[in-house]
Image (spheres, rainbow, N blue to C red):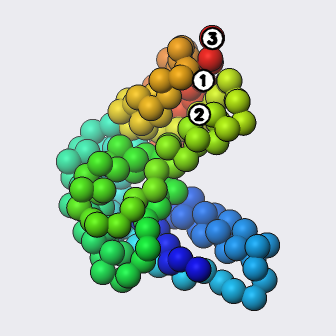
Amino acid sequence: MKSVGIIGGLGPETTSEFYLKVIFQCQKQNATQRPSIVIASVPLLFEIERDLIAFNKGKERYIPFLVNEAQRLEKSNVDFIVMPCKSLHVFIDEIRNAVNIPVLSIVEETIKYLKKKDIKNVGLISTSATIANNVFSARLNMWHSMLDATREGRPFTDINQPKVCFWSKM
């Protein structure tokens, strides 16, 4: 069984939920073996996290933290890295360039799944950073239109308040 490294801690709830899902799915496949998992909880100051998540500002402050954690995971001999936080995928290229092991993309895996299942309409609940940096839309070129449902509502300033976008295949 392969060893997985998780870059987490940005939304610790997401990291813990992802960890449990991996464990339970592996148990369904093989009740006698547990996967080797190393979690790197990124030690960001709240203001740095808030600025990106709520206001899409200060992206450059994230990169050293994420690259450091990715390299630490690589040194721990994991076979690949995942990031359960969609917003971190703003930095996937920088992270991939910093290590010599695969960094899986939740975006690429989601698109594979959508294509495989021929799903034509997609809703995304996400942060300002994910939407403003086109984390999904830049790769969802099979969809022809996008509706940002938050443009109708109040400004996104609460770090715990998600945004919503919908893509529809024409």
Tell me the distance, in whole angstroms, between the alpha carbons under discs 1 and 2: 6 Å
Q: Relative to residue 164, is residue 102 drawn left or right?
A: left
Q: Dot 2: what SS? A: strand
Q: Nearer the viewer, residue 1 or 67?
A: 1
Residue 27 x/y as whole percent? 75, 77
Q: Which mark is residue 124?
A: 2
143 or 87, which lies in front?
A: 143
Residue at position x 30%, y 80% in the image: 75
Kindly check if marks 1 and 2 are in contact, taking CB atoms under 8 A apart as contact.
yes
Q: Nearer the viewer, residue 127 or 78?
A: 78
User: Whole-percent x and y of residue 28?
Assistant: 79, 73
* Quarter of image, res 29: bottom right
**4 in relation to 151, above or below:** below
Q: Which residue is mark 3?
A: 170
Q: Nearer the viewer, mark 2 or mark 3?
A: 3
What label does residue 166 carry, if any?
Answer: 1
The N terminus lies in quadrant? bottom right
In the image, farthest residue toward the bottom: 32
Determine the secondary structure under disc 3: loop
